[in-house]
Image: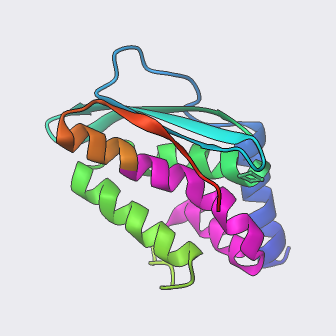
Amino acid sequence: MSLDELYREIILDHYKNPRNRGRIENPSATAGAYNPLCGDEVDIYLTVADDRITDIRFEGRGCSISQSSASMLTEAVKNRTLAEAEALADEVRGMLLGERDPGPDLGDLEALQGVRKFPVRIKCAILSWNTLKDALASYRAGVGRGEVKVVTD
Ligand code: FES
């Protein structure tokens, strides 16, 4: 199996069997994003305790890349500290934007680097990571609920 096929399989697996799908009642913070151009959306819910993400869920609909990226995100940041989650979001965003190579221990997230070959899909993969950053910012600001961002690029 080629690397591209492996990446595709990982993405499809997360799309068909999304991890941590659903919502958290009374979350510590949430944020959402909506792209009216394609209709895709994602909402992220966080429970934070002792500066650590102890639970995370997402809801959404849309293309396989946007939804599988959100699923991978929830697995990757669960039980990380807020600072670690923020650093990971920056790493993945940098990888997707071609600004840096992926680190050695990204696990399934490495599959997202296959998206770099298809520039119009980068926005799909990045949607949930930007939303995570919004949720973390809301939490830090003590707001809890970030506004749903409308993404048009
Ligand atoms: Fe809309 Fe993928 S086509 S985020």
Residue drawn 41% across the image and 61% down it: 89
Compared to 25, does 48 lie above or below? below
Residue 54 lies in quadrant? top left
Residue 46 lies in quadrant? top left
Q: Residue furthest left?
A: 50
Q: Nearer the viewer, residue 56 or 125?
A: 125
Q: Is residue 9 magenta?
A: no
Compared to 25, does 10 lie above or below? below
Q: Nearer the viewer, residue 31 or 113?
A: 31
Q: How many marks?
A: 0
Residue drawn 46% across the image and 77% down it: 104
The residue segment tinted magenta is 106-133
**Relative to 16, is 83 on the left or the right?**
left
Q: Is residue 115 magenta?
A: yes
Image quarter in which the N terminus is found: bottom right
**Relative to 4, is 101 on the left or the right?**
left
In the image, residue 106 lies at what x, y percent? 49, 67
In the image, residue 97 lies at what x, y percent? 56, 77
Residue drawn 59% across the image and 52% down it: 151
Residue drawn 69% across the image and 77% down it: 116
Residue 8 lies in quadrant? bottom right
In the image, residue 25 lies at what x, y percent? 40, 14
In the image, residue 132 lies at what x, y percent? 42, 48
Residue 79 in sight in this render = no
Residue 146 in sight in this render = yes
Image quarter in which the C terminus is found: bottom right
Q: Main secondary structure of the magenta part?
A: helix
Q: Nearer the viewer, residue 41 or 116?
A: 41
Here the colouring is: rainbow
Compared to 126, does 67 lie above or below? above
